[in-house]
Image (spheres, coloured by chain):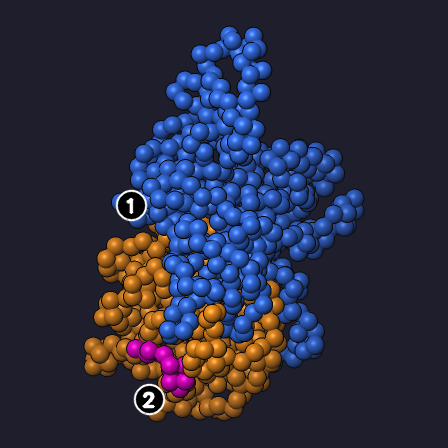
Amino acid sequence: MPLSVQETEIKNPPVSRPPLDPHLKALENEAIHIFREVAAEFENPVMLYSIGKDSSVLLHLARKAFFPGRVPFPLLHVDTTWKFKEMIEFRNRIADEYDLDLVVHTNKRGAEEGITPFTHGSAFYTDVMKTEALKQALDAGGYDAAFGGARRDEEASRAKERIYSFRTPDHKWDPRNQRPELWNVYNGMIRKGESVRAFPLSNWTEVDIWRYIQAEDIPLVPLYYAATRPYVERDGMMILAEDPRLELQPGEEVKHGSIRFRTLGCFPLTGAIRSTASNLDEVIAELEIATVSERQGRAIDRDQSGSMEKKKREGYF
Amino acid sequence: MSATAASTSATILPFAESAARVTRDARPLRLITCGSVDDGKSTLIGRLLWDTKAVKEDQAATLARDSGAQNDLGLPDFALLLDGLQAEREQGITIDVAYRYFSTDKRSFIVADTPGHEQYTRNMATGASTADLAVLLADARAGLLEQTRRHATIASLMGIRQFVLAVNKFDLVNYDREIFDRISHEFREFALSLGVRQITAIPMSALKGENVVSPASDAMPWYEGPTLIEALELATARSTQAGGFRMPVQRVVRPGESFRGYQGTVAGGAIKPGDSVVILPSGTVANVSQIVTFDLVRNAAVAGDAVTLVLDRQVDVARGDLIASIDAQPLTGTAFDAQLVALQQGGIEPGKRYWLKSGSRRQRVSIEPLSQLDLASGQWRPHASTLTMNAIGKVRLAFEETAVFDAYDQNRATGAFILIDPDTLNTVAGGMITGKRANLGGLKREGDRVVLSLPADLAEQLMASELFASRREEVEIKRVTAAEAATLWRNAGSDI
């Protein structure tokens, strides 16, 4: 007698949608293939979950890849304690709703030493609260593969990164000696202590991400949509002014305006854009004529050209 | 923040138009660009990204800040846009394959941008492995160089069947039509000799943006062909929907006692519930009862789809197995012929046991080199020793357990493999199956003698000939039935 999927109890059964266009379908198929391959070849994978739009797409694809089974690995969120409040609320709701194993890690040393983006500068803060914290969490979990939502179109050094990006036991990336990657045949052989970062969204662009979110109706943190919010202008960025830890400097004042975010990170380091795009259609319409890249709002990318590569070599995603 | 999009309302498209723009009816076209720095490759890709608006203002500003340099048309130095790694910027060279993305209203494109320097073969092979089309650059002043021929040869070996010849720097030869006709004719002849029939030649100036994205009818009124972007929009993305159904099993999913599904990406053909399949290498037979995806239970799946198959009976299926249509089965055996590209220092050593990964299957293999391609002449030369880095060789693969493949020219997914060095665990070769090796061999060499297996009547005739009598020491003829001979020859692969 044929076995049937309907007999299986599935939490959150999917709803039926119109089929994806061939472009998005091809990207989705590729990502699912990568998810399944990594899950099968590695002993202890984990998915880096940053709560942003790319992570939301990544999570959606993971659920698709393993359906009707559960997502067979935990999600890891490196919490710097400086994330937007709405991000944390969203994270907890999603983990509950989708029945996910969520691991949250904060660099206790950094937190105890009072390292903040305001007092220690973005570079040092990022190094301790993100890069060091990530390495601590990966070591603690003994993970041999970590999924990330990085895309090659984001930044110049990422354009060269493999889908399986090999890391030494101390999480270093050597861009000059990457393993060749041919066809969709991935080399998952590593020694104990070594690991790979796996990037199922490598070939997606920012527009693809948004169109996929639209087509698949993927929930997002509301900060991506324009609303009237309080902000201060600092170093040419609009910083959201709702966290009491944000202290106004002389000459600064809290303003209100219709703003939204193109990427989400730590609120003191993430600049908003002026926008009235309050829903998906409007965000996509805005994006298609945008003349600046999405990482333009990220302070950590702006120190110097090549700074992402430096951070990646040291273990940053 | 001069560029906040919503504030520049004059440039916002009406939404209807915008929606039309985002409905793309094609898969992304993957292409590789081949040419040296002197041919203007970086300028060409930079021009494509710039004219399709894939480069954003802040990225251009970063470039301007880094270099301060602009080319003589006041555009950013495109080469810097492309060389992302610090070492590349410091040394002014391109180290590795980089991937670029751009799109038009009709289609999106993924460019594998490979370096044009001497150690190009392995990088080109890597970029070409996933490409549907190759853009080959030639400097109009220099015409076809040996390097252009090498690039075209490697691209065709990797299975690329669509070429675009970009005759660049055409402004520097005064847009002389005769020069274009000569170069494109010469190229066409060469490409045809490689078995590539879909060829488009385009005269262009990447620096001036002529015939790249914008047409150049003022400068070249005689040219009626497509611009580069039009040629790319019209190209076909590879599909393996013809041929037998293939799905390498990536994992088995068992969320509960009542469900057992086999997850994988369809690598060829199509499948629907009720179809009979064979599980290889075991040879077990079953019928497909369901095709499950997250969105819905489907009534068909085609090449490229990532699905979960449910079979109508309890059978032993594991990761690494291949599910195939019962009436169009792949090749199975322990000896295959292949072509491969050596990717690392140390090369590929005869007799050494490597890991071979193809689809989702990993198994032990040993390699016997047979010949090596001389890229300068295009000739295969006998070569039985180590294939050094960047070498392209024909090899014999010997497996310890049954292997399952299609020929690469039949199916790029089930005909491709990588070799992994068991000592370094690095990827040391990329390979393409050319055929199965029968142990008897339609035509093979045994020591100094060639063994010919022929239908009995043919064998008798040949042996009776005077010519054969004089070369009895070199050739041995075996008599087989006509059907056996046909099978042997079909499986003989690349012996010849």
Q: Nearer the viewer, mark 2 or mark 1?
A: 1
Residue denoted by label 2: A245
Q: Is residue B383 above or below residue B115?
A: above
Label 1 crowd (10 A; few <14 / some 14-19 / many >=20): some
Answer left or right for A19 relative to B85: right
Badge 2 and badge 1 in a common chain: no
Of residues B461 and B369, the one nearer the viewer is B461
Q: Residue at x 77, y 50 (%)?
A: B218
- Residue B113 seen in render: no
Residue farthest along the right direction in this orientation: B221
Q: Does residue A229 show up magenta in the picture? A: no
Per the rendering, the colour in which chain B appears is blue
Q: Which residues are magenta?
A: A93-103
* Identity, as a three-letter code, of the amino acid under mark 2: Arg
The colour applied to the residues of chain A in this rendering is orange
Q: Residue B110 is drawn in which quadrant?
A: bottom right
| Residue holding disc 1 | B422
